[in-house]
Amino acid sequence: MIDIHTHILPDLDDGPDNIEESLALARVAFEAGTKMLVATPHVLNGLDMNQSMQIVKRFNQFKARLKQDLPELELMLGSEIYFRPDLAGIAHLDVATIGAKGRYMLVEFSLVDIPKGFDRELKNIRSSGIVPIIAHPERNAAAIKRPALVRQMMDCGALIQMNAGSLTGSFGRTVRNMARNLLKRGWVHVIASDSHGINHRGPGLQAAVSAAAEIIGAANARRLVVENPRIIVEGLPWTDNKV
């Protein structure tokens, strides 16, 4: 399995405090069947060259240690960028996309609302050659009230990433019902852990895959953690038949 949304880098955001905790998280993910992780630290207040360089430095330090301790686990760099105008303008920075100069950008909205004009911005990102991936919209209060907003994101060219914990009930019944609803409608492209620690949004994906399989079948559930994420990490073009 490939996990495109993790907060595994040490001492950067609300993930692990140190490299030992990051390594422990990596081990749990690997033992649970994940073979590649994408480190996606939060970028909440804009992204500039200095911040990008700091993230790259921390990534390289952790990757070197991971290569010694757990060489079988692949690691890639990206970020989780808080939605704002002109996201396409920062796509040239190494951490803005999944993989340096990649094709896909992980974007998160507030958990409370979705701002006016989001559709215009998503279209701008897509027209610039970058495919936005919306992180965990099933947890967004506005989307829960109006699921059609998720469809609107897709109509703007965005992909939808669901959190594993949303399907397994970690965020409560309302979010779980929303997650199941999106799966039934075919409005989910990727399941990822959004892991922050071993005991806080852990890195395991298998329980969510099993829950998804009950709704959309085993082959389709596997596609959300294997085939579709591979397209993203390899920077391949997206086609509609991958939904």
Image (spheres, rainbow, N blue to C red):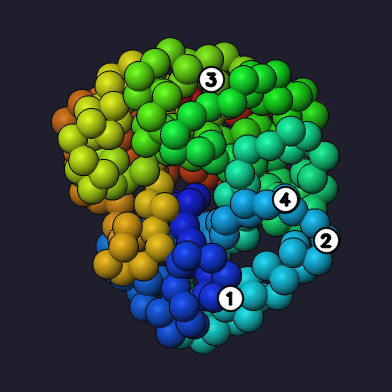
Looking at the image, do the residues carrying marks 1 and 2 touch, with CB atoms under 8 Å apart? no
Give the x, y percent position of residue 145: 35, 19
Looking at the image, do the residues carrying marks 3 and 1 touch, with CB atoms under 8 Å apart? no
Q: Which quadrant holds residue 52?
A: bottom right
Residue pointed to by mark 2: 49
**Is 96 or 232 nearer to us in this picture?**
96
Q: Nearer the viewer, mark 3 or mark 4?
A: 4
Q: Nearer the viewer, mark 2 or mark 4?
A: 4
Residue 154: assigned label = 3
- Separation of marks 4 and 1 at Cα, in angstroms: 25 Å
Element carrying mark 1: helix
**Horizontal side, residue 147 vs residue 4: left or right:** left
Residue 63: assigned label = 1
**Is 54 or 116 nearer to us in this picture?**
116
Residue pointed to by mark 4: 46
- Separation of marks 3 and 1 at Cα, in angstroms: 33 Å
Disc 2 marks which amino acid?
Met
Looking at the image, do the residues carrying marks 3 and 4 touch, with CB atoms under 8 Å apart? no
Disc 4 marks which amino acid?
Gly
**Is 137 or 162 nearer to us in this picture?**
137
Q: Closer to the N terminus: mark 1 or mark 2?
A: 2
Q: Residue at x 76, y 49 (%)?
A: 101
Give the x, y percent position of residue 122: 66, 25
**Horizontal side, residue 173 vs residue 163: left or right:** left
Q: Closer to the N terminus: mark 4 or mark 1?
A: 4
Element carrying mark 4: loop
Give the x, y percent position of residue 2: 44, 52
- Separation of marks 1 and 2 at Cα, in angstroms: 21 Å
Q: Residue at x 72, y 71 (%)?
A: 54
